Image (cartoon, helix red, strand yellow):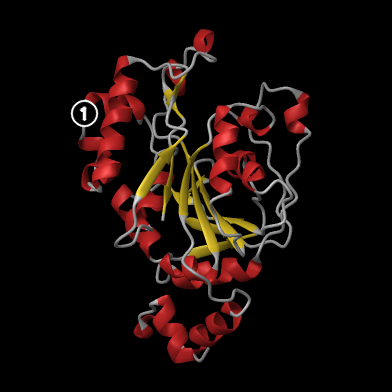
């Protein structure tokens, strides 16, 4: 593929890039051959224990994986990498981060030894220009990433990088930033947002944690409201979630677990539809609702 075709495919605005930038990006991108457009996922990751338990949600992750073409690599936007500024992991071998406490040793023993992809990190860095993106060599794969990806690809044979969420920016900013990553879908890159739409840890009903599809009234309302907006393709109120009903304010007391959904929606293209799965409430104040865009 020549550079002219390459620029057309990735949709670059030439005046934002020096010739050196273009040449470096073109060279690096050859590591990822062109493919059919990859789907996009938002995964409600829930408790870290989903990494080692057998339940309906783990089954949902495995089932959706069966519908996906095998990706060349994965880019994950996790609720658990919330930073000032934007970063992307760029190491060859990311560590498995056990960023939680109070769980059995069996969970801490789990390793997910997927390779990283410095090449994909560099492409992501360039695509997001002029937004500054730091190439990070310290983070790794947090539990928002590995506890769910391990069910999609249990052999850890797909390279994985993470893109952080800048906590100083609005939902609209993140929606627009995600749109700049569209070209990765044509390079066999599976982009995953990992969080939870209804996520109020302060109000979790631990006594009813195993009760099927149990939610407080406000959680039921929030789930139904968001699902209706998703199916209707009405994203403005989802982007302006902080201006919506009391139920949504209860469901989203902080944006960290919600913003991965906004990244996912920013990647949807014309003519694509959303399908929901794992669409249940847990412990009163959490939801496992997940979606696929294709």
Name the residue located 77 percent from the left edge and 27 percent from the top edge. Answer: 106
Q: Looking at the image, which residue sits at the far top?
A: 207
Query: Does 251 sit above or below residue 69?
Result: above
Query: Does 22 sit above or below residue 226?
Result: below
Query: Does 17 sit above or below residue 45?
Result: below
Query: Does 198 sit above or below residue 73?
Result: above
Name the residue located 66 percent from the left edge and 49 percent from the top edge. Answer: 153
Q: How many marks?
A: 1
> Along the horizontal axis of the image, is 191 left or right of 171?
right
The residue carrying mark 1 is: 245
Residue 88 percent coordinates (x, y)? 56, 59
Q: Quadrant of residue 68?
A: bottom right
Residue 263 percent coordinates (x, y)? 40, 52
Residue 196 percent coordinates (x, y)? 45, 35
Q: Quadrant of the C terminus?
A: bottom left
Name the residue located 53 percent from the left edge and 45 percent from the top edge. Answer: 64
Residue 220 percent coordinates (x, y)? 32, 22
Name the residue located 62 percent from the left edge and 46 percent from the top edge. Answer: 152
Q: Quadrant of residue 276?
A: top left
Would you say residue 66 is visible in this rendering? yes
């Amino acid at each position: 593929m020549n550079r002219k075709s390459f620029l057309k495919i990735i949709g670059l605005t030439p005046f934002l890039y020096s010739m050196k930038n273009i040449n470096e990006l073109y060279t690096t991108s050859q590591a990822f051959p062109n493919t059919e457009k990859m789907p996009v996922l938002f995964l409600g990751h829930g408790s870290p224990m989903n990494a080692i338990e057998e339940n309906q949600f783990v089954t949902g992750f495995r089932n959706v994986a069966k519908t996906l073409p095998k990706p060349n690599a994965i880019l994950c936007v996790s609720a658990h990498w919330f930073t000032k500024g934007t970063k992307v992991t760029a190491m060859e071998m990311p560590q498995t981060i056990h960023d939680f406490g109070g769980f059995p040793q069996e969970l801490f023993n789990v390793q997910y030894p997927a390779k990283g992809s410095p090449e994909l990190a560099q492409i992501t860095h360039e695509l997001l220009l002029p937004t500054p993106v730091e190439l990070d060599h310290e983070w790794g794969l947090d539990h928002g990433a590995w506890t769910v990806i391990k069910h999609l690809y249990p052999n850890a044979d797909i390279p994985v990088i993470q893109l952080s969420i800048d906590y100083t920016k609005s939902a609209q900013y993140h929606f627009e930033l995600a749109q700049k990553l569209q070209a990765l879908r044509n390079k066999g890159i599976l982009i995953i947002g990992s969080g939870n739409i209804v996520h109020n840890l302060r109000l979790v009903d631990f006594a009813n944690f195993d009760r099927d599809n149990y939610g407080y009234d406000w959680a039921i309302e929030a789930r139904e409201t968001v699902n209706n907006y998703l199916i209707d393709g009405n994203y403005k109120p989802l982007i302006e979630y902080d201006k919506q009903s009391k139920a949504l304010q209860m469901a989203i007391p902080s944006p960290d677990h919600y913003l991965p959904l906004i990244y996912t929606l920013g990647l949807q293209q014309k003519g694509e539809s959303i399908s929901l799965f794992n669409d249940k409430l847990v412990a009163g104040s959490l939801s496992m609702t997940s979606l696929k865009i294709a």
